[in-house]
Image (cartoon, helix red, strand yellow):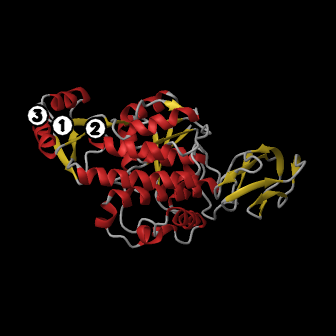
């Protein structure tokens, strides 16, 4: 029972795309650069830490790294049964689950980053992590300050983030320490995210969300706002809009995932923040991170229970399993082959994407198509499902 987790702003670091330049999944960067008009190669390879701290850059760079990682693990057939993303990571989760088209997601992430950056510049705000204090006492510390300060993130047991005006955050931090907190640690951020200070950004983002079509996800996506798993496309416009001014209920989300039977928590993207939170919250769970192509072998060993050969797998092949996914070689419109059913030979043509052939790398019994005629698919999106001998 694998859940894929996607990090948010703050996990980015300089040159985090370097390991992916020669990997096939780098093609997503090329596609997203054309969609967004941003120099993503420079952002992922040459931007320094100061440039990456800017909200408009941090969010897009983190999203793109998560998308490359997800694309890479799809190529070797590792599948999760749920998705969850922290703040910005929710957009990565929705894209990976198929609820958002990749191009639409890129546009929303760009708009979200710009909106939050402008909002932070117009309204001075900051955030601080309160360590070693129960949630209710952190809430009490905020309530005792007659100023603008709120809980922004419930991250893990004994780790809550507060946000608001600099003066109010400092005052609430002092009260929290009086109540028993071990530390009140200021965070290097440019705004009070997930608080009412982000109201103007929410209004701007809502207009962009209204222009996007959502689809039912392939597996439940757990939302920051209510910590519940959602399987309906209709839920997400309101949830994403509310997210900007509501606290991220990550600890509650991890508890829900634990109760749902998740046993393996895999963080896809830069950093290991979510891995650490899952380890603290879900006792006995297996926690893994995939930051670079080198981490994929470790993931394969963990999910298969056997050492990886290190030689890679056929694209679309799930190791040590009897089911296989054939994935798209590129982005574009899918057209299938008429009357395709039954036994499939290795190399057999299953359709085309933008004129490029989609051929099965293995033999098996065709169970069905996962892409519909005329659908726009992304690179490495599953096209067909086979069962092998």
Q: Reading the chain from its start, which is encountered first: label 2 or label 1?
A: 1
Q: Reading the chain from its start, which is encountered first: label 3 or label 1?
A: 1
**Between 363 and 26, the one nearer to me in the picture:** 26
Query: Closer to the observer: label 3 or label 2?
Result: 2
Q: Position of residue 17 (x, y in %)?
A: 46, 66
**Between 198 and 371, the one nearer to me in the picture:** 198
Q: Which mark is residue 279?
A: none
Residue on which the image places disc 1: 148
Relative vertical location of residue 12 with respect to residue 209 in this rendering, above or below: below
SS of the residue under disc 1: loop
Residue on which the image places disc 2: 196
Relative vertical location of residue 313 with respect to residue 131 in this rendering, above or below: below
Specify few, some or many for label 1: CA neighbours under 10 Å numbering under 14, 14-19, or 20 or more.
many
Query: Closer to the observer: label 3 or label 1?
Result: 1
Q: Reading the chain from its start, which is encountered first: label 3 or label 2?
A: 3
SS of the residue under disc 2: helix
Q: Position of residue 21 (x, y in %)?
A: 52, 71
3D distance between C-alphas at marks 3 and 2: 22 Å
Q: Are marks 3 and 2 in contact (CB under 8 Å)?
A: no
Q: Position of residue 49 (x, y in %)?
A: 31, 66
């Amino acid at each position: 029972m694998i859940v894929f987790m996607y990090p948010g702003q703050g996990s980015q670091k300089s040159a985090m795309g370097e390991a992916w330049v020669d990997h096939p999944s780098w093609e997503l960067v090329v596609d997203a650069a054309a969609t967004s008009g941003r120099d993503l190669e420079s952002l992922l390879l040459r931007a320094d830490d100061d440039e990456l701290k800017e909200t408009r850059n941090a969010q897009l760079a983190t999203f793109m790294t998560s998308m490359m990682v997800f694309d890479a693990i799809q190529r070797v057939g590792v599948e999760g049964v749920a998705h969850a993303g922290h703040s910005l990571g929710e957009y990565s989760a929705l894209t990976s689950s198929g609820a958002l088209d990749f191009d639409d997601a890129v546009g929303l992430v760009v708009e979200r980053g710009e909106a939050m950056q402008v909002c932070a510049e117009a309204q001075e705000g900051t955030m601080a992590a309160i360590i070693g204090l129960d949630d209710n006492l952190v809430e009490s510390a905020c309530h005792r300050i007659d100023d603008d300060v709120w809980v922004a993130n419930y991250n893990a047991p004994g780790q809550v983030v507060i946000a608001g005006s600099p003066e109010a955050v400092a005052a609430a931090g002092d009260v929290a320490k009086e109540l028993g907190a071990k530390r009140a640690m200021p965070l290097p951020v440019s705004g009070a995210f997930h608080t009412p200070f982000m109201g103007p950004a929410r209004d701007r983002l809502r207009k962009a969300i209204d222009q996007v079509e959502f689809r039912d996800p392939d597996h439940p996506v757990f939302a920051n706002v209510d910590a519940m798993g959602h399987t309906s496309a209709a839920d997400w416009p309101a949830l994403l809009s509310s997210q900007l001014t509501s606290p991220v209920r990550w600890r509650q989300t991890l508890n829900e995932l634990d109760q749902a039977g998740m046993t393996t928590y895999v963080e896809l993207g830069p950093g290991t923040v979510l891995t650490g939170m899952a380890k603290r919250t879900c006792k006995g769970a297996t926690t893994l991170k995939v930051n670079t192509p080198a981490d994929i072998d470790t993931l394969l060993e963990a999910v298969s229970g056997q050492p990886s050969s290190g030689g890679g797998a056929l694209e679309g092949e799930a190791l040590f399993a009897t089911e296989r996914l054939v994935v798209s070689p590129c982005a574009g419109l899918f057209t299938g082959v008429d009357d395709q059913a039954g036994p499939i030979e290795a190399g057999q043509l299953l359709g085309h994407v933008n004129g490029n052939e989609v051929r099965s790398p293995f033999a098996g019994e065709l169970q069905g198509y996962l892409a519909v005629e005329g659908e726009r698919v992304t690179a490495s999106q599953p096209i067909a499902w086979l069962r092998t001998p």
